[in-house]
Amino acid sequence: MTATSPVAPPGATASGTAPRRGTSSPGGARRKRKLLGANPLGLLFSAPYLAFVLLVFAYPLVFAVWMSFQDYFFAAPGAVVDRPFVGLDNYARVLQDPAVWQAFGNVGVFLIINVPLTVVLSLLLASALNRIVHARVFFRVAYYVPYVTASVAIVGVWLFLFSGGGLVNNLLGPLAPTPSWLINSQLAMPSIALFVTWKQLGFYILLYLAALQNVPKELYESASTDGAGAVRSFFSVTIPSVRPATVLVLLLSTITGANLFTEPYLLTGGGGPNGASASPVLLMYQRGIQQGNPDVAAAIGVILVVLVLIIAFLQRKFAGGDES
Amino acid sequence: MSADVSTRKRQTPGQRQTSGRGAAVLRGVVLSIGALVFLFPFYYMVIGSLQRTPDATVAGAFPNIANLTLDNYAAINSRIGLLTGLVNSGIFTGGVILGTVVFGMLAGYALSVLQWRGRGVTFALALLVQVVPFQLLMIPLYVLIARDYRLADTHIGMILPFLINSTAVIIFRQYFLQVPKELFDAARIDGASELRVLWNVAIPLVRPALLTVVLVTFIGPWNEFLWPFLITKDTSLQPLAVSLANYISSVAASAANPFGAVLAGAVVLAAPAVALFIVFQRYFTSTDIGSGVKG
């Protein structure tokens, strides 16, 4: 894969930067000291991007936090309305809402199933894929196809497969759960977690494949010289070598889980049964846009992001991503 | 692979041969079962979209000539207008790709080739922006774009939050860094303006990056659901993902063969992305996709 890849490994890029900086400094004599640097055009070229970052990220970000402390409601554009500062009122409302607790609990269930499954399956499949010679392209395509396909499209098949009289239940016969998967309050969220794991796995397999190709072959050779079998060298060579990739997989799958919206909205008809598969983002949509309380929705968003940051920090701390 | 380097006392070469073959067979089996699990839903999507009456039995997973029809495609087309949906998806996706490529390339070039004050801060910003989650921005962006700027039910409102992609800026920067600086200097000595250097020297050299960015950017807006769903109520402006989702969640129950129609719509929505991916699969590299988030 590296051979066909147009991108050099990250290391090559990093080392490519260093000499370039060096070569630019001897020319410092002819370079006039300008206020904006040697090429002020750079600022002009980056101006659209900077404007975009300010308008679409920075300002809405501040706006979201500000909104969560106001009594904010939708008004006609241009209308002058009073939106008083209410302190932590929105947060109090959010924390007193059992539906919010349920949604955060649901996403917890989702992450407990999705994240470990994603790490284990993608690492196993990537290591198998890394060793084979034939049909590599076929397998890569097979695993990646769900990732490039819209959730909305695949949800249609999933509904067909996992409905009460669907193919899966027909295959399972008496083992099929009643009520069926997506309308079962115990199984709705695990079903969604499985769906998302399946859909995203190809992306993580590709991440691990790139990491595996950077593991020096000598490590496996010396492990086998020391008498390590396939299983042993998987645990003592492969897993430690791909640790930075694992940290990335943990982080990205956690963020994906926290973003969950489309799947509960479509697979379980808006987070049913009885909110058993509602996600925080689904709740933000319902509270903020359907029920017209954007301040409450913003507060849910702030809480969600703070929780994700805490989880990401803990993952980084315990999985140890410092070497990257 | 590495096993044949050392022939030690522990195993005779014969044993090693069989265990190696066994492992290879095991790998093949695991990968094949995996591929089946990954591809079957797509196969089933196509089969289901062609069935006159939905057949959820095991036999229904195999094509039955008597039960095949294109009626489901006609049915979904009469409900949500597949062509309109595809055109809207195309405009949305095209707008995002255009903005991402033009502005991403300018910024990427500025960040890698030009020396200017604020360059380091801008690059740090590009990395930082990637960790800002969309959930937090969803509500304020909706308020700003739909309410304050009155861009609901417009293509611009749909495109705006995705107009420039920080990952693309970072990918372009990485590629431009790999181009020898002397090539740019030579053009400058010949009196070329910076824009001309970018257009005539830099861009032709990083054509693979261009393709990668287009492909990586394509699947985002083509598959995006939440934002266009929030911002469009007018069905004649909805991308296919949104109109199909609305069909799934509301009117599907009233159709003659709802699943067939849903699956027919799903095939139409999935086909362009899947086809593009299969044709250009070697340009989808995890290095590019992961580079943005690696920080």
Image (tube, grey):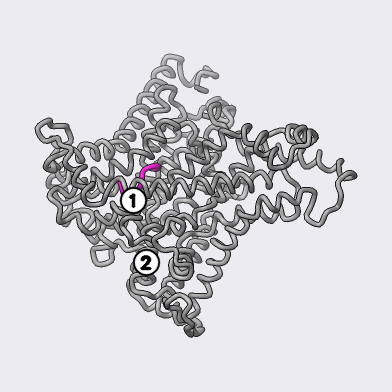
Inspect the image, locate mark 1, and give the three-letter code of the amino acid beneath it: Ala
Magenta-span inclusion, residue A148: yes
Left or right side of B294 for A147: left
Asked whether residue B239 is drawn in magenta, I would say no
Residue A261 against residue B4 in the figure, above or below? below
Q: Which residue is at a point 18% across and 36% down the rendered structure image?
A: B61
For the residues carrying marks 2 and 1, which lies nearer the camera in this image? 1
Q: Position of residue B269 (x, y in %)?
A: 32, 44
Q: Report the residue that reaches farthest toward the right.
A: A29
Q: Is residue A219 visible?
A: yes
Residue name at image x 53 percent, y 75 percent? A66
* Alpha-carbon span between mark 2 and mark 1: 18 Å
Q: Amino acid at mark 2?
A: Tyr
Crowding at mark 1 (Cα within 10 Å: few <14, some 14-19, many 20+):
many
| Residue B59 spot, x, y in % from top left | 13, 35
Could you tell me what secondary structure mostly forms the magenta stretch?
helix
Q: Residue at x 52, y 72 (%)?
A: A65
Which of the labelled discs sits on residue A285, or is there none? Answer: 2
Q: Which mark is residue B241?
A: 1
> Where does the image place residue A197, in percent across and percent down from the top left?
37, 47
Give the residues drawn in magenta, as a range: A147-153
| Above or below for A176 versus A17 | below
